[in-house]
């Protein structure tokens, strides 16, 4: 955690994590006093640059945070993602899987190599942090479902678990199999419920304009909490 002050007054706080092999840094919390946003944010970014020179820094903020949006735009940060923040907090219980969808399998350490190629077909193009290499490093915390309607993987979903919470990081589907996303979202919830019981919250950030994923989330009981922007800069 980093904090900046003006005298004895706390002006800003940044909490996050970084990955040395990937030269990747993610700020999970980036707060600055509204009246002194630019000064506080400059101090925080300068401290990060001193510690993590050469890293790519990603900061997610609410679209409603006009101070943050103006700051990042003025400092020539790149907006790399515009997402809808959806959350599931009212656990719906187990729901039936539609018939005729094909075999849904859980990817494990023993089958991950077969899954990795399908995963990277999407994750690499989208420049996701969780490409197959990073996903495999944290595989124990992830739950991955893959749909095989004809013996080949055509769609998948992967989510990270955090004690009594989870976050869906991606739902992938080949062309012509987009309808499988709704099936996979529901099956993932069923899988989590069977393994862990009713979770406190499941988070799912959906790219703005992706009506298929948004419909899948809303049908499964997710609610829209807001909109977010992800900014990137080189430290």
Image (cartoon, grey):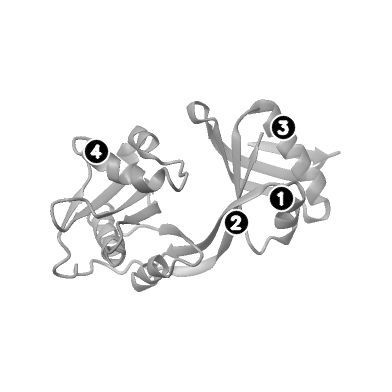
Q: Nearer the viewer, residue 213 or 29?
A: 213
**Disc 1 to disc 4: CB gap under 8 Å:** no
Quadrant housing residue 91: bottom left
Residue denoted by label 4? 112
Q: Which residue is mark 1?
A: 72
Closer to the camera: disc 3 or disc 4?
4
Q: Is residue 117 above or below residue 227?
A: above
Dot 1 falls on a residue whose secondary structure is: helix
Q: Nearer the viewer, residue 221 or 106?
A: 106
Helix, strand or loop status at disc 2: strand
Residue that sits furthest to the right in the current view: 7
Task: Give residue 152's position: percent from left, percent from top.
Answer: 17, 50
Query: Picture coordinates of residue 107 (x, y %)?
Result: 23, 44
Label 1 to label 3, Cα distance in Å? Answer: 16 Å
Upstream in sequence: badge 2 or badge 4: 4
The mark nearer the N terminus, 3 or 2, is: 3
Q: Secondary structure at mark 3?
A: helix
Name the residue located 66 percent from the left edge and 64 percent from the top edge: 64
Q: Earlier in the sequence, mark 3 or mark 4?
A: 3
Q: Which mark is residue 47?
A: 3
Helix, strand or loop status at disc 4: helix
- 10 Å crowding of disc 4: few (<14), some (14-19), many (20+): some
Tell me the mark number nearer the camera, choosing from 1 and 3: 1
Looking at the picture, tell me which residue is in the foreground, 177 or 110.
177
- Real-space Cα distance between discs 2 and 4? 31 Å
Quadrant position of the N terminus in the picture: top right
Quarter placement of the C terminus:
top right
Q: Which residue is mark 2?
A: 229
């Amino acid at each position: 955690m980093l904090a900046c002050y003006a005298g004895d007054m706390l002006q800003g706080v940044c909490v996050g994590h970084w990955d040395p092999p990937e030269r990747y840094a993610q700020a999970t919390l980036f707060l600055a006093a509204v009246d002194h946003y630019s000064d506080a944010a400059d101090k925080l970014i300068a401290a990060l640059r001193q510690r993590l020179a050469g890293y790519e820094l990603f900061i997610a903020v609410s679209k409603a945070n006009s101070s943050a949006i103006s700051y990042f735009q003025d400092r020539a940060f790149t907006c790399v993602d515009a997402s809808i923040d959806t959350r599931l907090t009212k656990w719906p219980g187990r729901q039936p899987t539609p018939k005729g969808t094909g075999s849904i399998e859980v990817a494990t350490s023993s089958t991950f190599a077969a899954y990795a190629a399908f995963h990277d077909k999407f994750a690499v193009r989208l420049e996701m942090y969780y490409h197959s290499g990073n996903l495999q490093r944290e595989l124990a915390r992830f739950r991955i479902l893959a749909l095989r309607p004809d013996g080949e993987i055509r769609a998948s979903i992967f989510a990270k678990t955090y004690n009594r919470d989870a976050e869906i990081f991606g739902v992938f589907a080949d062309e012509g199999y987009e309808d499988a996303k709704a099936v996979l979202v529901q099956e993932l919830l069923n899988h989590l419920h069977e393994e862990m019981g009713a979770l406190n919250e499941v988070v799912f950030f959906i790219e703005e304009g992706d009506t298929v994923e948004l419909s899948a989330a809303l049908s499964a009981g997710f609610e829209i909490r807001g909109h977010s922007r992800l900014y990137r800069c080189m430290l």
